[in-house]
Image (spheres, rainbow, N blue to C red):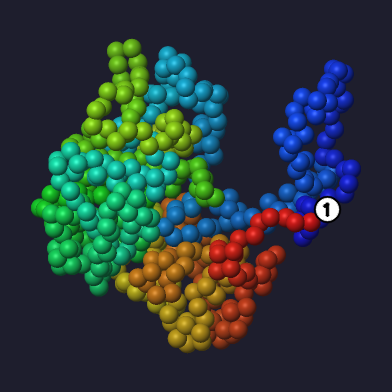
Amino acid sequence: MELIFEKSRPGRRAGSIPGSDVPTTPIEEVIARKLLREEPDLPEVAEIDLIRHYTALSRRNFGVDVGFYPLGSCTMKYNPKINEDMAKLPGFTGLHPYAPVEFSQGNLQLMYELRGYLSEIFGMADFTLQPAAGAHGELTGMMIFKKYFKKKGEKRTRLLIPDAAHGTNPASGALCGYQTVTVRSNSEGGVDIEHLESLMGEDVAGLMLTNPNTLGLFERRIEKVAEIIHRKGGLLYGDGANANAFMGKARPGDLGFDVIQLNLHKTFSTPHGCGGPGSGPVGVSKNLVDYLPIPRVIETDNGFDWSYEHPETIGRVRTFFGNFNVMVKAYAYIRTLGPEGLRRASEIAVLNANYIKAKLTPYYDLPYDRPCMHECVFSGTLQVRENGVHTSDIAKRLLDYGYHPPTIYFPMIAPEAIMIEPNETESIETLDAFCNAMIQIAAEARDNPELVKAAPLTTPVKRLDDVKAAREPDVCWKG
């Protein structure tokens, strides 16, 4: 397929603008030529060629509206279009963030009520909606850690992070000046309690625990973990990016978590990917509410208002007040489903993941064989041992069957990892078709390994050099 620049022909236009009948002065007489930029090198094409080009490109894209997207750890689920419609209502899209509060009452009320819903669902005392995404929420949580211990006059320098945590956790801790220390997993894929006890001291700020972790496993001894951390005065942080596995079923606040960040764009209905938009609210226990960012939405006798009078706050962490359109979709999702619907969504997400685990276990290695939560993690080590077919080959071959590959080579504690998250929106027919493709690929890896190693064979672009693309990206057109 030609690039749009290769279709360019001098003088062609996708539109025309009538000449101005207002006398003008040559721009060079107003602004010195040296201050003017050169005209950008844009392609010159007719409108029909422009439309056909980008329509053809769109047909090569893959998204959840096109097919199954089993991308583990990212919850790429179908989201109801009604929530998109709600976010596009003129009262939401037409309001400037700096509009006076008397003109913003509906928007402020939505944010106020969403904070309340999240606090109830996750058992926390209060939430901030400012953080723009999950990792930003992690950073906000670590800033709250820092302020809390500073207020107490304690200098804590270390932060514990399990080896099955999300990869952004260490970076969030390091950005706040903590030395991150890895906690080993046990044979069941949970926190090694003895190792945790040996690391926990009074110089440790706390533990950042992804629960369920990146193996898709719930921490069975979570109460013991919380007790170990709290006994030494530390705080327990919950990475709640995988909340679609337990919303309505378990409340982190009840389990001993002091801070939790969510990913509204994963769990609560927003198309997710390509860098945004996202929303990463942070919830805290009662003793940490004073440190939440400002401004905060409060209810007064005259409606809703912004409150800045919080002397212990960590301050503002986001321009304006967060990604508001994502909040609207999350609010609509919660109000539509209600408590029973949220609980049912979690149950189906867990059921679907365990269904895939059961169907594929005879064909792929399973590093941690126990009931999983929202995702299951296989290993391609069987295929490597038999015929040198790696997980990356299996992922590329899936493209020929019309499926976006799952997450691979993560978490790193599982060799040749294949992380599959079916989420709650997929039917049993879709899961069966996907599993049949994975079973067929396992058979191909055994009987015709060179076929799998050469995949993909049917896509417009064949196998790329992934490492080179990541390290030496070249997206500049040079005619």
Q: Position of residue 423 (x, y in %)?
A: 43, 55
Give the residue at x 87% y 25%: 19
Task: State whether residue 239 is above or below residue 95.
Answer: below
**Which residue corresponds to the image point at 33% horizontal and 42% vertical from the top-left?**
140
Q: Residue furthest top?
A: 302
Residue 332 sits in which quadrant?
top left
Name the residue type under label 1: Lys
- What residue would you read off at disc 1? 7
Query: In this figure, what is the number of numbered marks?
Result: 1
Give the residue displayed 69% in from the left and 55% down from the top: 476
Kindly state the secondary structure of the residue where label 1 is placed.
loop
Residue 253 appears anywhere in the view: no
Q: Position of residue 116 (x, y in %)?
A: 30, 32
Residue 338: image x %, image y %? 36, 37
Badge 1 crowding class, 10 Å Cα cut-off, few under 14, some 14 to 19, many 20 or more, is some
Q: Is residue 449 above or below residue 134?
A: below
The image quarter containing residue 191 is bottom left
Indicate whether 131 appears above or below 29.
below
Is residue 381 toward the left or the right of residue 209 in the image? right
The quarter in which the N terminus is drawn is: bottom right
For the point 35% across and 64% down, which residue is it? 215
Residue closer to the observer: 146 or 400: 146
Relative vertical location of residue 455 with respect to residue 319 in this rendering, above or below: below
Q: Quadrant of residue 141?
A: top left
Q: Is residue 459 left or right of residue 243?
A: right
Mark yes or no: residue 181 visible: yes
Q: Residue furthest right?
A: 11
460 vs 228, nearest the viewer? 228
Residue 474 on image: x %, y %: 64, 60
- Report the front residue among 143 and 185: 143
